[in-house]
Structure formats: structure tokens, C-alpha cells
Image (cartoon, grey):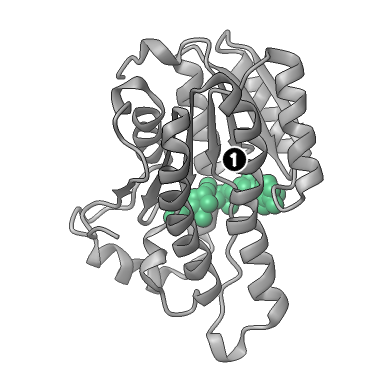
Amino acid sequence: MAKYEDLKDAVVIVTGSGRGIGRAIAEQFADQGAKIVITDINAETAAETAKEIAAKGVETHSAVCDVSKMDQVEALMQAVIDKWGKIDVLVNNAGITKDGMFLRMKPEQWQIVLDINLTGTYNCAYAAVAHMRKAKKGAIINISSIAAGGNAGQANYSASKAGVIGFTKAIGKELAPMGLRINAVAPGFIDTAMTDAIPDKIKETILANIPMRREGQPEDIAKAILFLASDQASYITGEVLNVNGGLGGL
Ligand code: NAP
């Protein structure tokens, strides 16, 4: 495993980290010796994951936070500042799908995906930057998706993830003079509960189209995020890193 000395003792917040990709990201930051905030809408998985990661010998903080609710997000950031006095890295990982063809997509199905995936990313970035800018240092990594290129049956999700890319590029430019770096990672098809829900027949077609002929693992995404969070990426901002087994770039 690559070692990033600057991530030791860094304060890292990973949203939606009770399970899936978020959990793998939190574990890899812990392996670097960072202080980890495990936060999720699900109190049970957040507490359990924080307990298991603490067993690696790092400090953890577990908190319930629905990223679509600004009051909860602000309370989370303040709790981290009260505990550790700084926020070095924010990973906007929390996200959901509510798939369906556009002609049958209900307004609430559209809205909740935009509220969590896009507004949630805005909320967390806004509240974290209020603290990061005082330190004149910080990194935010937003999770987009290959679906940002437009997936049939995912108009809501594709729009939210394309929005994340535009948002990343815009604030990457705005916040660079303040010493903050904002990047995105766009995963392809990754083995988590989110993709477990896809019927086997569709999965087979997806896998056949991936040049590497395999699905990615949450750890593949975590490795890319660690790099972008570290000083090794100190001249990279407003960028989208595709991690998708060769499916192509956004
Ligand atoms: P996952 O297994 O469904 O995990 C998502 C986590 O986010 C869960 O712990 C979930 O809590 C939590 N969450 C849901 N709504 C939330 C909210 N409002 N506030 C805070 N936390 C919330 O998904 P994943 O596959 O790990 O995906 C992680 C990220 O990667 C998402 O942004 C997703 O869009 C993106 N992504 C995934 C893939 C893939 O192939 N898996 C591909 C491209 C992009 P619950 O346990 O209560 O559901």
C-alpha cells in the first residue's frame, strides 16, 4: 500500500461511510494514520464501522448526518471542529439511486436523488469550506459516476452526477487561490450493495463492455481518493479522475 506521510493525523470526513465505497475509503485513510469521521444517515452502520476502524488504532468519530439537510451538515462540521480543531479532507461519497425510465419518473423520485447526490455535495462542501478556508489548506473529493455521461433509466442519477462534475470544476477555480483543492472521482461499475440491486442479465452486459472485463472494488476507488487528498496531488484541482476499468473518460 502507498504511504502518504502528510495524511497521518489529517482529519478526514467521509459521508455515507457506514458501508460500501465510503467504508473502504475510511478504512484506507485509517491505514494512513488519519483521524476519521464516519458519518452516515444510518446510525447503526456508522457506529459499527467507526468501532471496527478504531480497532486499527486510529481515532474515529461517528455521527448521524443526512447530507441533504443543511442543519445536520453544519452540526456535523462544528462537532468535528470542536473535537479536533480542523478539517483537512472531505469526501462527498453519500449517494443514492432511484432508477426508472424518464417517462415514468415521478417528481419525488427525481427530487430525492438531486437532493442527496447534488445538494448534499453542495451542503457538505459549503459547511466544510467555511472552516477549511481559515486554515488556507484543504482537499475535497466529490464522488461522481460514469453515469454522468447519461445512462438510460437513470435520468435523475445521471443529472445529479453530471452536476457534481460541473460543481467540482467551478469551485475548483474559485477556491484555488485560497489554497483549497477540489476534485472528483468518477467510478465505473463497482461491487457494492448499489450494484447488487442490478438484475444479473443486465450485469452480464455491463461486464462484457468493460475493457478490463471485471467490476471494480471499493478499494480501487479509495486508492484514487487517497492520492487526490494527498500532497502528491498538490497541483491538481478541478479535475475528474475516472476509475472504471477502461470505459473511457468524462
Ligand atoms: P451504497 O453501498 O448504497 O452506500 C451508500 C451509503 O450512503 C450508505 O451507507 C447509505 O446509507 C448512505 N446514505 C444514503 N443516503 C444518505 C444521506 N442522505 N446522507 C448520508 N448518507 C446517506 O453505495 P456505494 O456503491 O458505496 O456508493 C457510494 C458513492 O459512489 C455514491 O455516491 C454512488 O453514487 C457512487 N458510485 C457508485 C458506483 C457503484 O458502482 N457502486 C458507481 C459510480 C458511483 P444506508 O445504509 O442507510 O443506505
Quick check: can you spot residue 28? yes
Task: Compare residues 129 and 150 and report the one nearer the observer.
Answer: 129
Q: Please, is residue 141 above or below residue 166 in the view?
A: above
Q: Between 163 and 49, which is closer to the camera in this rendering?
A: 163
Taking the spot 48% from the left edge, 59% from the top edge, the residue there is 195
Residue in view at x 58 percent, y 58 percent: 118
* Side of 58 relative to 211 (left or right): right
Q: Nearer the viewer, residue 162 or 153?
A: 162
Quadrant in the picture for the C terminus: bottom left
Q: Is residue 54 above or below residue 16?
A: above
**Is residue 192 something that shows in the picture?**
no
Tell me the element at label 1.
Answer: loop
Q: Is residue 159 above or below residue 175?
A: below
User: Residue at the location (61% across, 89% down)?
Assistant: 104
Position of 169 compared to 53: left or right? left
Q: Position of residue 49 (x, y in %)?
A: 64, 29
Residue 215 image offset from top left, x and y in percent: 33, 52
How many marks can you see?
1
Q: Residue at x 58, y 27 (%)?
A: 132
Classed neighbour count for the residue bearing mark 1: other residues with Cα under 10 Å, few (<14), some (14–19), many (≥20)? some
Image quarter where the N terminus lies is top left
As drawn, the residue found furthest toward the bottom would be 103
Mark 1 Cβ inside 8 Å of ligand 1:
yes
Residue found farthest to the front: 177
Task: Name which residue type carries label 1.
Answer: Arg
Where is residue 173 drawn, in percent x and y?
A: 41, 45
* Residue named by callout 1: 19
- Image coords of residue 208 (percent x, y): 24, 66
